[in-house]
Image (tube, grey):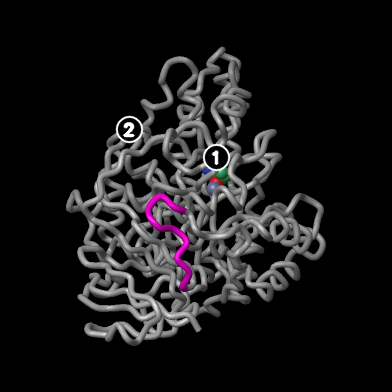
Amino acid sequence: MASTLIRGGKVVTAAQTQDADVLIEGELIKEVRPGIPASAAGRVVEAGGLYVLPGGIDAHTHLDMPFGGTTSSDDFETGTRAAAYGGTTTLVDFAIQPRGTRMRQALDTWWRKAEGRSCIDYGLHMIITDLGGAGLEDMDEMVREGVASFKLFMAYPNVLMVDDATIFKALAQTAKNGALICMHAENGSVIDVLVARALAEGKTAPVYHALTRPPRAEAEAVHRAIALAEIAGAPVYIVHLSSEDALNEVREARDRGVPAYAETCPQYLLLSVEELERPGFEGAKYVFTPPLRPKEHQPKLWEGLKHDHLQVVSTDHCPFCFEDQKVLGKGDFTKIPNGGPGIENRLQLLYHHGVNAGQLSLNRFVELTSTTPARLFGMYPRKGEIAPGSDADLVLWDPRAPHTISAKTHHMRVDYSMFEGFQVRGNARRVFSRGELIVDGERFLGQPGRGRYLKRVTHGGAWK
Ligand code: URP
Ligand code: ZN
Ligand code: ZN
């Protein structure tokens, strides 16, 4: 069995930082301690001056997803390769149940998209659009297949949105089967009225996407989602939380001991609504939901990360090219495909603006980007940990490496970067996935299709 010794690095987990060597045997971590002899392994990788981190876990991506009359531009090959370059070794993507169909069909469809393409390990959430017929049984079947989480939409009426009765039934089912509901929390019905009003007034530019989706519409939905979860006796996880208003709802619930969890994304921490006012329709590059908020929300979200009111940073990577996809909404902001790219830049941005800026400890950085997503989504301790028996998904992180983010050099299949010109310090130098070196500097060594589907486990009611 192939063995590798990673020698002389600083091993950083959510719980501790220590000078230690890591011995990999086959796909797993065998030993973590200082002073493992070089003779223990067939290959030695020197990691002096580097951090050894558990591979990043992005719990929210949309690869090869049909949406807004087109399909997200990264598929499972290009998207997972870009993720790996950025130090992410696991992702959880979303299968979508078309209305009137069985969830099994959607799962098969997404397995086919990923099979032969994914360069890293992946799990799938199931987006529920319809609980009629055998929906509740389907949820249990999905859990048996390792789909330990579901996403429901309180927005996008007539497309993905479900009503409160459906939300409540799904939550009640997870109270029994132990899965976790991820909620897209925005009041879609109210937003639709605001959108119709804006269009009637001739307000068609990209910025009206943001102005018709106010923070209170997010906060109201977060409040409702948590209340419904409480009635059902189930936990709930709010996805892509963007505003102070919404954050206050999560904090208030958690202070009462409710198992409510939430993620935010780098775009909400670092960008603001002004981006949508860029001239030449460039604002369309920043059209995603929930929208970017006024700058004042950003420090509140950083505080939320510090104090565990927010538990996860994911990307909501949903790329559409500017030239031939975002342009579909020229003259009508409602036709701009909603979504933005970011799968490659999550660790760089959070490390630089979090750790370097003194907002997050190194251990908290690891917790937010790897360990907590592994725990919440049923992959821990196989993923998200550096310990004997865990998968050898490891990132050798160079804390001094300068990097300028740009569409000219990124590996995502999209013609722009939301963070164009951002200068960061700290980057992945080498990336191992189940013991295999898949990124070595600029060289990609992994093969498409080597990534495996992860059968995730539920918590069976063991929420805090
Ligand atoms: O605009 C976004 N966020 N697109 C992806 C779909 C979603 O709501 O997560
Ligand atoms: Zn969403
Ligand atoms: Zn999303």
**Observer-nearest residue: 120 or 233?**
120
Q: What residue type is labelled 1?
A: Arg
Find the magenta span and give its range: 435-443
In the rendered view, tell whether residue 343 sits above or below residue 91.
above
Does residue 165 appear anywhere in the picture?
A: no
Q: Which amino acid does label 2 sit on?
A: Gly
Residue at the spot of label 1: 413
Residue plotted at (30% across, 43% down): 403
Percent position of residue 186, x then y: 52, 43
**Observer-nearest residue: 326 or 394?**
394
In the rendered view, tell whether residue 78 sits above or below residue 233.
above
Query: Given the current orientation, which residue lies at the most extreme top position?
Result: 202
Comes first in the chain, label 1 or label 2 = 1
Q: Total label count?
A: 2
Residue at the spot of label 2: 421
Specify whether 124 is left or right of 378.
right
Write down the quadrant of residue 155 in the picture. Answer: top right
Residue plotted at (34% across, 77% down): 5
Does residue 127 appear anywhere in the picture?
A: yes
Neighbourhood count class around disc 1 (C-alpha, 10 Å): few under 14, some 14–19, many 20 upward = some
Residue plotted at (49% across, 72% down): 434
Write down the quadrant of residue 276 in the picture. Answer: top left
In the rendered view, tell whether residue 451 sits above or below residue 289.
below
Residue plotted at (53% across, 16% down): 203
Percent position of residue 51, x then y: 26, 65
Percent position of residue 408, x then y: 43, 33
Q: Give the SS element for disc 2.
A: loop
